[in-house]
Image: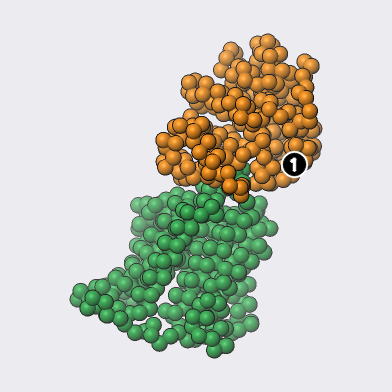
Chain colours: A orange, B green
Amino acid sequence: MAEVPRSEGAPLLAVEELVVAYGPVRALHGVSLEVFPGEIVAVLGPNGAGKSTLLKAIAGAVAPAEGRILHAGRRIDGLPPEEVVRRGVALVPEGRMVFPRLTVRENLEVGAISRRDAGIGEDLERVLSMFPVLRERAGQLAGTLSGGEQQMLAIGRALMARPSLVLLDEPSLGLAPIVVHRVFELIARMRQDGVTVLLVEQNVHRALEVADRASVLAVGRVVLSGSGEELRRAEGRLERAYLGIGGRA
Amino acid sequence: MSPEELVQQLVNALSLGAIYALFALGLAVVFSVLGLLNFAYGELVTVSGYAMLLLARRDLPFWAMVVGAVPVAIAISMAMEFVAFRPLRRASPVVRLFSSFALAVIIQNLIRQLISPRPQGVPVPEFFNDAVRLGGVRIGVLPLLTAAIGGACLVGLSVFLKRSRAGLAMRAASQDFAVSRLVGVRADRVISLAFAISGALAGIAGVLWVSRRTSVSPTMGFGPVLKAFVATVLGGLGNLSGAVLGGFFLGALEIVLEVVLPAAWRPFLDAIALSIVVCVLYFRPQGILGGTELT
């Protein structure tokens, strides 16, 4: 296993020996992972490796059976999702999952439902500037947006919670290549804005381009981790060994 | 039919429709958020009626009976959620349905034991039976008041859902409960709120309903919950606009049948009305508006 480079200071997110089971079936067998402030960390792996389960467990949508999850040093495992988001961890779920019969603006407003501060209007303005297409369609029902627009909206909705950590679950899934490009630009931009990102992706090539570090998950275990650069160099081997797909996705 | 009669019947239809719409909305608001058909909903109407009765026995004026009855229905509705549904949140829908049946039976029997198994008269103001002259047409005060209050409640609820943060949270929860929690909607709070609104609607509709029938009985909730269920299914289960539409449709249908049916057929009014509903659903099985969201 490659030597994992360590960023300085305390991790923003620490997952320790996490076990998640759906009934008798274990989806994660003791996964450990650290994400440091300002990093983009990718979790790669084939379908069924437990990537989405990992993000759902961090977000509080599924309860872990064993192990700990710490955000900024405080335990968040076992908290319901509505409390996890209040701690500053926002999930952009797989398949976007925008509220189809709320308007674009309402989707963004509901993203700030956990907040009581006065900065919500300002953040709405900031997100709308970040995504001009959302401003154009602010009054439109979210269900009428294209897949790419819905992905932008889902990301914008998560940012409205003003999170310190964003969990992105397969943000490029089912999107046209040009839109995928835009999504990854946004991920890089989020880091510039001081948001830390934990990214689950099937698009290995793209994910490794943007990620500082990556872990590869297979059948519920971390089987390889290293810097984005290291994994990029080993990409061919990595894909053959763990992903079973050929070439760039 | 004279033009005067036509207007009168129109107001009657709007008035009965408004009551049914409120009944239906109260049932639908919980269904849309929780996916639960609360069959103890009718008992909230009963409870508001009995609250009026008990306040009347203390010689309180009618307005005080109304002001007292609605909060009682709200409180009982929220208590229902806390006692009978919250512990079963992860249980199957069938289990929760049975829980709601059990609640209904328990409340009915409590009333039988604590108050009386027999119907009790509830005094309502004399002027409810008066008529006012509007543009040359005499219209009953109670139907007019009922239609106006019902309409005001519908507008109020709509504004609440569209304009307030809590309303936004409820609409999000009704579209995707799991995702709404991920963005920060507090599950317990939004469900409590749905039951509070459900109780308020049952309470207000109950007051209007009791004002019409001027009596209460332990099983009086069956009619309202049945009408609410029919109207909700007719409009599209869980769709709030659909529930309102279904309520008005059902109310209007009953008034039309009352007018056109020969006296000998009157006993079959409900059966005929429901047959027509079945026909509508045959052609639109998803309901008039269809869907399971707050729109």
Helix, strand or loop status at disc 1: loop
* Tag 1: amino acid: Asp
Rendered residue at 59%/75% (across/down): B108
Is A104 positioned to the left or the right of B144 in the image?
Answer: right
Question: Is residue A93 at least partly visible in the picture?
Answer: no
Q: Judge whether A221 appears above or below A162 on screen.
A: above
Q: Residues within 10 Å of mark 1 (few under 14, many from 20)?
A: many
What residue is pinned by disc 1? Answer: A77
Give the residue at x 54% y 52%: B165
Observer-nearest residue: A15 or B210? A15
What is the quadrant of residue B199 in the picture?
Answer: bottom right
Quarter occupied by residue B258: bottom left
Q: Quadrant of the C terminus of chain A?
A: top right
Using the image as rendered, state which of residue B120 and residue A61 is in the foreground: A61
Residue A182 position, x and y percent, is 51, 24
Pinpoint the chain carrying mark 1: A
Measuring from the top left, give residue B146's x and y in whole percent.
39, 73
